[in-house]
Image (spheres, helix red, strand yellow):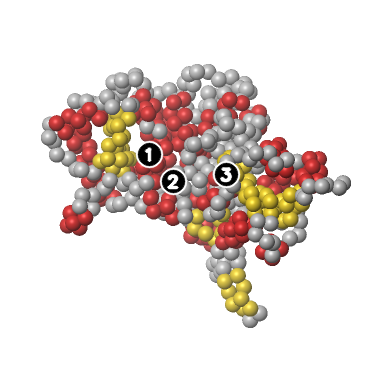
Amino acid sequence: MANEKPKLKLAVYWGAACGGCCVSVLDVHEKLFDVVANADLVFWPIALDFKYKDVEEMPDQYIDVTLFNGAIRNSENEHMAKLLRQKTKILIAYGSCAHMGGIPGLANFTTKEEIFKRVYEESESLDNPDKVRPTPEVDVKEGHLHIPHFYEDVMTLGQVVDVDYYLPGCPPQTERLVEVFMAVVTGAELPPKGSLVGGAPRVQCDDCKRKKSEKKGITRFYRPWEVTDDGETCLNEQGILCMGPATRGGCGVRCIEGNAPCRGCYGPLEGIPDPGAKMMSAIASMLEGKEEDEIDKAIDTVIDPAGTFYRFSLPGSILRRKQK
Amino acid sequence: MQSTEQKTEQWSPRIVAFFCNWCTYTASDLAGVSRMRYAPSTRVIRVMCSGRIDPEFIMEAFAKGADGVLIGGCHPGDCHYSEGNYKCLRRYKLLQKYIEQMGIPKERMRLEWISAAEGKKLQEVVNEMTETLRILGPSKIKNVVETLAK
């Protein structure tokens, strides 16, 4: 039980996230004992009862490692990101949302006004005759009340604070987390600041076991329910859009092994600022048609290019959001 | 483009033009040596083939303040590398769909096949696109991207 080395101080926090990343930390299963043998969890709202003031009272750089998951969607997310940055030695953007904006980042296809109108005025299950909307600050006789401000745009963690490492995935593969964690614990030499850790330096296709041919010869794409996958040929060759060619490996091709196309949560490879651009490029090379109407027909079957190619990465992409 | 000139004359759009080495770039050379006058709105980037133009280049151009992007390649069947222009066309079609979803008017991006002999066509295309963009007005994409990347 006695551990000579001082334990690491570990924090896990969420911004705009679904909670899956926090749960993925629990997926270490029995390895959790290794984690708690080496680290004290000093802040982890999903599992432990800490308050904001507990973090505020910590000295600067008190926490060794913070896994920040979730995107920056409102003022609370931003405040906590900045606070944790101040209190933490190694801040890790954990998961697709913190890394590239993730699913909440799809809100950048719309505006705050559109979202509020839909949610507080038009939603079918709504009972709000006065069209009341959240008021971030209000004075009542008991005092001043405030809730976080909802931002116009969703941002990645790296767009708001300085990030030490990025650990991709939706959620990150737990084995990768353990590897990174053990590297910190054992004092191994860490990669340069700003690096992506816990991902492979190759695309999904390199790990994928499906049969691939040199000439793809695709004439159209299908929605997954329109065709029956033969279980062994490259999904793209069968006309099922798979983000594999533009997505970093490291997850163990989990989705493809489960016969579902890759959706791109691990993001692009090193040095590529925009996964969607690369995917569009790949698709253009895979398609066969040369005549304009042939090409038009094929492109028509790519139903939602922006949503499909930027499912996890819109705020982190080159154009970042839909123009208002 | 002195500032005094800008004040007196109307706003002029900036077009980033990706021209393939074998056809459209040569056409712009031809337009030049033939002393054809056309709007001074393009900033030409020579690429070896229109098939070399990654969608990333186009997005980057918009994000850095281009009001329009013009792509010039060899006519179908004429590609120096046999198929590059078809790849370019497929990419362009996909990109058109994407930029419309991103709220960018599709007139801001244009693809034209201009052969080495078509200096005249180059002149017309540039003038036409400049006029279209002038009506559309300055692009705000750069501002939006920069506000988000604070």
Report the chain holding disc 2.
A
In this view of the protein, can residue B134 be seen by the observer? yes
- Tell me which numbered mark, 2 or 3, is placed earlier along the sequence: 3
Looking at the rendered structure, which numbered label has been put on residue A319? 2
- Label 2 sits on a secondary structure element that is loop
Badge 1 density bin: few <14, some 14–19, many ≥20, Cα 10 Å: many
User: CB under 8 Å between callouts 3 and 1?
Assistant: no
- Label 3 sits on a secondary structure element that is loop
- Nearer to us of marks 3 and 1 is 3
Report the chain holding disc 3.
A
Q: Nearer the viewer, residue A9 or A129?
A: A9
Q: Nearer the viewer, residue A134 or A55?
A: A55
Q: Position of residue A37 (x, y in %)?
A: 81, 46
Q: Residue at x 36, y 21 (%)?
A: B83
- Whole-number angstrom distance, CA of label 1 to CA of label 2: 10 Å
Looking at the rendered structure, which numbered label has been put on residue A193? 3
Looking at the rendered structure, which numbered label has been put on residue A117? none
- Label 1 sits on a secondary structure element that is helix
Do marks 3 and 1 share a chain?
no
User: Residue tagged by mark 1?
Assistant: B58
Q: Quadrant of the C terminus of chain A?
A: bottom left
Quarter of the image holding residue B15?
A: top left
Report the chain holding disc 1.
B
